[in-house]
Amino acid sequence: MKKVGISVMFDEEKLSATKMYMSQKNLDVKTELEKVLDGMYAKYVPSNVREFIGMKEQTPVKNKSEKAQKKSEVEVPSE
């Protein structure tokens, strides 16, 4: 899935302190923010919409050569 960037304004001293204490626990602000956003997605986006988006992600776009190869790989059962 294509990723996009977001930006938020936050107090510089608070951010600096947050980063300092998170680094002591081997945590990263970006990673933790991504987890929070994933939680918001799970909380606010209806499950049927999340399921639909998940299905779209898993559907590979096949080109003609892949389709032709699949047809040639089909086995014919012996009698």
Image (cartoon, grey):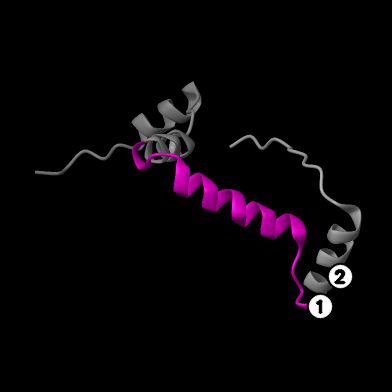
Quarter holding the C terminus?
top left
Q: Residue furthest top?
A: 64
Residue 4, percent from left and from top: 69, 35
Compared across the picture, whether 58 is left or right of 13 comes to left
Residue bearing the label numbered 1: 24
Q: Amino acid at mark 1?
A: Gln
Q: Which residue sits at x=53%, y=53%?
A: 39
The amino acid pointed to by label 2 is: Met
Q: Quadrant of residue 13?
A: bottom right
Picture residue at 40% right of the left edge, 37% below the top: 55
Residue 46 colored magenta? Answer: yes
Crowding around mark 1 (Cα neighbors within 10 Å: few <14, some 14 to 19, many 20+) is: few
State the SS at label 1: helix
The answer to whether residue 35 is left or right of residue 70 is right
Question: Which quarter of the rendering shows the N terminus?
Answer: top right
Which element type, helix, strand or loop, lies under badge 2? helix
Disc ID at residue 20: 2
Residue displayed at 30% across by 37% down: 74
> Residue 33, percent across and down?
68, 54
- Range of the magenta residues? 24-48
State whether residue 44 is above or below residue 32.
above
Q: Main secondary structure of the magenta part?
A: helix
Q: Nearer the viewer, residue 34 or 70?
A: 34
